[in-house]
Image: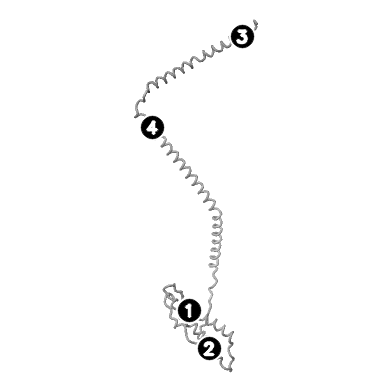
Amino acid sequence: MDSAAHRPIELQSPEDFIYLIDNVRRAAAENINEAFPPVEDGQEEDELRNRIEQLVNDYIVTTFTLAAPNLTINGLPVDPSQFLSSHGLTQPQQQEVIEEYEPFDARKRDRIEELVAQEEDLLRSIAQLKRRVPGATAARWADATREGIAADEAALEAARGRIEEDAAAAGRKALEGMGDLDRQRDVEGRFKDAVAGLERLKRDMPAAVAKMERARVAAGYVATSTGGRR
């Protein structure tokens, strides 16, 4: 594999690499022992088992040799020859794996409980936000939309008022520049006469109505008197 194309696997110490090799060899030895139980002392050597052990060991050595360029130990390249040998899978040269456990620390346990509580609080906050935020966001969007529409309508009315004022001013300016119209004095005189006639009619109307009322009463009296004579 091209190690430049992939990030190498980082190991912290040589013991990590030995741990991987020994685990693979141990697993292979257990499977071989199940399939080919070792011969008892004094019996003939099992050539088939030995051959299979050699093939499996060669395969493990080849696998880790090819994988070594993709591994680093503390940031340094790995030399597989320092960790691999041609001995069989059951040779005593294999190192015993010692598992170590960190002593119990009550402070770390308390810290874990605090982190779990914080996680639960965050999950509850997220759930509440999921319930509240969509409605609040929609309400703000609706308010903003209404405000925008109101602002647009006000701007439209203002523009319409300016257009009407400009049109009226342009009309007055055009009329002022036209001068007196033909027969303007005659039209103005007739208009004044009509206004004066209406004023006289308004002033004389009560007296005319009173005369008509007296004439109606008199006509009724005359009609009644004439009928009685017949």
Q: Position of residue 154 (x, y in %)?
A: 46, 40
- Looking at the image, tell me whether mark 1 or mark 2 is earlier in sequence order: 1
Q: Is residue 52 left or right of residue 190?
A: right
| Amino acid type, residue under disc 1 in the picture | Phe
Q: Mark 2 = which residue?
A: 51
Please tell me how crowded label 3 is: few (under 14), some (14-19), or many (20+) other residues with Cα within 10 Å: few
Q: Mark 1 = which residue?
A: 17
Instruction: Determine the CA span between mark 2 and mark 4.
Output: 116 Å
Q: Is residue 207 above or below residue 169?
A: above
Residue occupying the point 59% across, 85% down: 35
| Amino acid type, residue under disc 4 in the picture | Gly
Q: Secondary structure at mark 2?
A: helix
Nearer to us of marks 2 and 4 is 4
Instruction: Determine the CA span between mark 3 and mark 2.
Output: 159 Å
Nearer to us of marks 3 and 1 is 3
Q: Position of residue 202 (x, y in %)?
A: 49, 17
Q: Is residue 64 above or below residue 225?
A: below
Q: Mark 3 = which residue?
A: 223
Please tell me how crowded label 1 is: few (under 14), some (14-19), or many (20+) other residues with Cα within 10 Å: some
- Looking at the image, tell me whether mark 4 or mark 3 is earlier in sequence order: 4
Q: Position of residue 102 (x, y in %)?
A: 53, 73
Residue occupying the point 45% across, 17% down: 197
Instruction: Determine the CA span between mark 1 and mark 4.
Output: 98 Å
- Looking at the image, tell me whether mark 3 or mark 2 is earlier in sequence order: 2
The foreground one among 230 and 25 is 230
Nearer to us of marks 1 and 4 is 4
- Looking at the image, tell me whether mark 1 or mark 4 is earlier in sequence order: 1
Instruction: Determine the CA span between mark 4 and mark 3.
Output: 64 Å
| Label drawn at residue 114 | none
| Amino acid type, residue under disc 3 in the picture | Ala
Name which quarter of the figure residue 73 lies in. bottom left
